[in-house]
Image (spheres, rainbow, N blue to C red):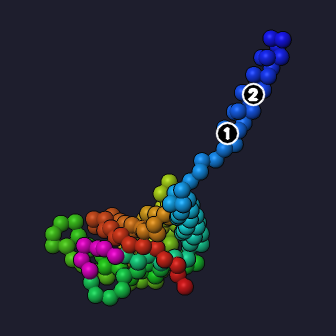
Amino acid sequence: MKKTVIIVVGLLLCAAAVTVIGQKKVLSPKEERREVREKRRAERIANYEKFMDSLVLSRNFQFNPTTFQRQPAGPMRVGMWDGTADITLPYIKGYVPPYYVTIINYTVSDLQGYITEQTHEGWMVTFSTSLFSASTYTFTFEIFSRTGGATLTITNPWYNPVQYTGSISQLY
């Protein structure tokens, strides 16, 4: 008799646990809409991150800077395609004042050490070129996959590093 009571009580507890686990919380319409919005937002962000990842890996993208110490007249961009870089950027030369601004306006195909590595925030793309001069310029892009933003740092052994911030877009 004691065994049957223990077995029946055990079965009732298991049945109660299954029904409690199987129940869903009833959401109000406002909470449901919020959950749907959050899911859509997460999907949109995931899709954009995939797009940015494929853009960087394809080596067909354009960097559009939005900030620089001094804004010159004319376009500013770095376009990348098939191992070639089209560079049109202002550049500050000099270690000590007086600094002077020059324009880097080259299309170069001799990119050396092109490295693409994934980081926890996006990508680091690095390459070097001589820009038809005696020294080497190193271009380092820090690309943020979630936002499409990017930071470009140009270093040269003779001058201070120059940093640009902007966005990455598809090269058509």
Identify the amino acid type marked 1. Answer: Ile
Q: Residues in magenta?
A: 66-71
Q: Is residue 9 left or right of residue 130?
A: right
**Quarter of the image holding residue 76?**
bottom left
Relative height, residue 137 to residue 64 (above, below): above
Give the farthest residue toward the top. 2
Residue drawn 70% across the image and 33% down it? 16
Give neighbour class at mark 1: few <14, some 14-19, many 20+ (Cα, 10 Å): few
* Residue 140 point in image, percent of width and height: 42, 65
Residue 30, percent from left and from top? 50, 60
Residue drawn at the location 29% of the way across and 73% of the way down = 68
Q: Give SS at disc 1.
A: helix
Q: Are marks 1 and 2 in contact (CB under 8 Å)?
A: no
The secondary structure making up most of the magenta span is: loop
Task: Judge by depth and name the residue closer to the eye, 22 or 131.
Answer: 22
Q: Of the residues shown, which amino acid type is indicated by label 2?
A: Leu
Regarding residue 138, the answer to whether it shows in the image is no
Pointer 1 residue = 21
Residue position for label 2: 12
Compare residues 99 and 65 and report the one nearer the observer: 65
Give how far across and how far down residue 102 sits, in percent.
Answer: 28, 80
113 part of magenta stretch: no
Query: Is the N terminus in the top left, top right, bottom left or bottom right quadrant?
Result: top right
Residue found 76% across the figure and 23% down from its top: 10
Residue 48, labelled with which disc?
A: none
* Residue 66 against residue 28 in the figure, above or below: below
Q: Nearer the viewer, mark 1 or mark 2?
A: 2
Q: Is residue 69 magenta?
A: yes
